[in-house]
Amino acid sequence: MAQTVAMVGLGIMGSAISANLVSHGFSVFGYDVSEAARAAAKANGVQEVASPGEAARSADIVLLSLPSVGALHAVVSGANGIIAAGRRDLIVAELSTLPIADKQRSHDALAAAGIVMLDCPLSGTGGQAVTGDLSVYMSGDAAAAEKVRPVFAGFSRQQDHVGPFGSGMKMKAVANMLVAIHNVAAAEAFVFGMKMGLDPALILKVAGNGAGGSRMFEVRGPMMVKDDYPATMKVAVWQKDMQIIGEMAKAVACPTPLLNTSAIMYDAAMAQGRAEQDTGSVCAVLGEMARLTR
């Protein structure tokens, strides 16, 4: 490929994305604050760099997959950040789920340095990222988004330009609202069926193929069947996403009764010490509430 790509943030999503890009023939550079994450990415063919600034100097397009607002601002405006690299012929695509106002702040700082930033959050779990089963909600400069689309196609199944900068996060909030509700709904259905004596594997096969099936039933149902929840989205990280959705809904005075109800289950998962488990563990939370024995 003519384009070189830098991945800043090599966690669950970033590591899967970079590995898929390497497999599609891209030259990929990677940076993470974690030495272990950098080593794992290097084993997958990613070329290690020492800072976000070096990532910017090495690539045509920089992808950001970051855990917090603080990390975003450090990567963009820090001493060894992207702006400090002095590049102007660069496109930065921010893939994380973070407040629009904070993304806009970084967008404006980069624009002042002659760099285009896109807001392009992803829909899908870490497990889906491994198989390239992600959707990209591109927003911002349409011409820049088209230049990056071939890169996005290297790790996703769908890429949609949804409007001006920030529209990606708005669409992601809609998608995550559905994920939050459908995940708890799937868990509730599994526990109900198991409480009546049905085999959970049979529930997954039969109910999941009927009118009541959903993407979350399909993706997290196998975890619920096994009662085993390796993290593709940690409950602790999901709390951040839920807070962002709640704040966005409050800002436009939109009631979210089902989201608010589902949030109780994620809070309960945190209280039970499931912060590092996948959000599918709400099935175990509901199972304990139902005194389900498995």
Image (tube, rainbow, N blue to C red):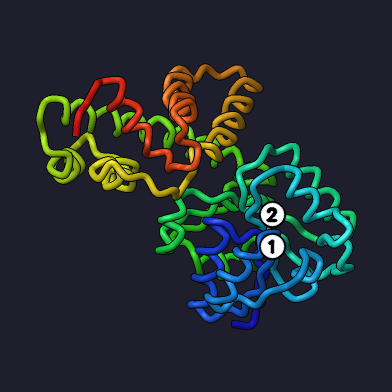
Residue 206 lies in quadrant: top left
Q: Which mark is residue 118?
A: 2
Q: Report helix, strand or loop for mark 2.
A: strand
Please report the residue visible at 72 percent of the width from the left and 60 percent of the height from the top: 92
Q: Height in image: 32 above or below 137? A: below
Marks 2 and 1 sit apart, C-alpha to C-alpha, by 8 Å
Q: Residues within 10 Å of mark 2 (few under 14, many from 20)?
A: many
Do the residues bearing badges 2 and 1 touch, measured as CB atoms within 8 Å?
A: yes
Check disc 1 and report the residue beneath it: 144
Q: Residues within 10 Å of mark 1 (few under 14, many from 20)?
A: some
Relative depth, front residue between 243 and 236 = 236
Residue 54: x and y in percent read 79, 71
- Camera-nearest label, 2 or 1: 2
Relative depth, front residue between 50 and 81 = 50
Q: Height in image: 136 above or below 89? A: above
Residue 201 lies in quadrant: top left
Which comes before the other along the chain, label 2 or label 1?
2
